[in-house]
Image (cartoon, grey):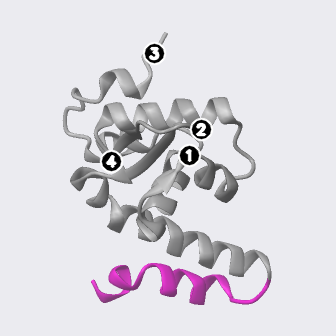
Amino acid sequence: MSRPRAKLKDNFPGCPVESTLCYLDGKWKGVILYHLLSEGTLRFNELRRRIPSVTQRMLTKQLRELEVAGLISRTVFPVVPPRVDYSLTVLGQSMEPVISALKTWGEAHVACKNGIKTVASAVDSVMPLAAAE
């Protein structure tokens, strides 16, 4: 039986892609990082409103894993009702190029599926660096 990526995060001999993916491993982690990158510090319920498909339990689990990985920080304010803010750490902010690339690719993919662009023009818009090489 294979071990999950999260347990192997410090042991990826020669595979930087898998090392990067271990931080995004999970259905909602990339989406959470995207919202924190684009909107800054958010409270738990603000994240829930921005990601309506996620359950409260799953959002809590994914936020905890991102915190353990060092990508986000959790600040609890001693007020009633409790207020918890989530923000990106320096390590989390360094994921900006990765999340931006995923966003760009996703926009082009949706445009292709909707018939707005051809596959070639969508790929060119997503991969300008590949065309330059």
Residue density around tag 1, few if under 14, some if 14–19, many if 20 or more, within 10 Å: some
- Disc 2 target residue: 59
- Asked if residue 30 lies left or right of residue 74, the reply is right
Q: Is residue 113 above or below residue 92?
A: below
Q: Earlier in the sequence, mark 1 or mark 3?
A: 3
Q: Earlier in the sequence, mark 2 or mark 1?
A: 1
Q: Earlier in the sequence, mark 2 or mark 4?
A: 4
Quarter of the image holding residue 58? top right
Residue density around tag 4, few if under 14, some if 14–19, many if 20 or more, within 10 Å: few
Q: CA distance from mark 2 to mark 3?
A: 25 Å
> In the image, residue 24 lies at what x, y percent?
44, 44
> In the image, residue 102 lies at what x, y percent?
49, 65
> In the image, residue 39 lies at what x, y percent?
47, 68
| Element at label 1 | helix
At 36% across and 79% down in the image, what residue appears?
130
Which residue is farthest front?
Answer: 80
Mark 4: amino acid:
Val
Q: Which mark is residue 17?
A: 4
Count of labels in the image: 4
> In the image, residue 49 lies at what x, y percent?
69, 55
- Asked if residue 11 lies left or right of residue 63, the reply is left
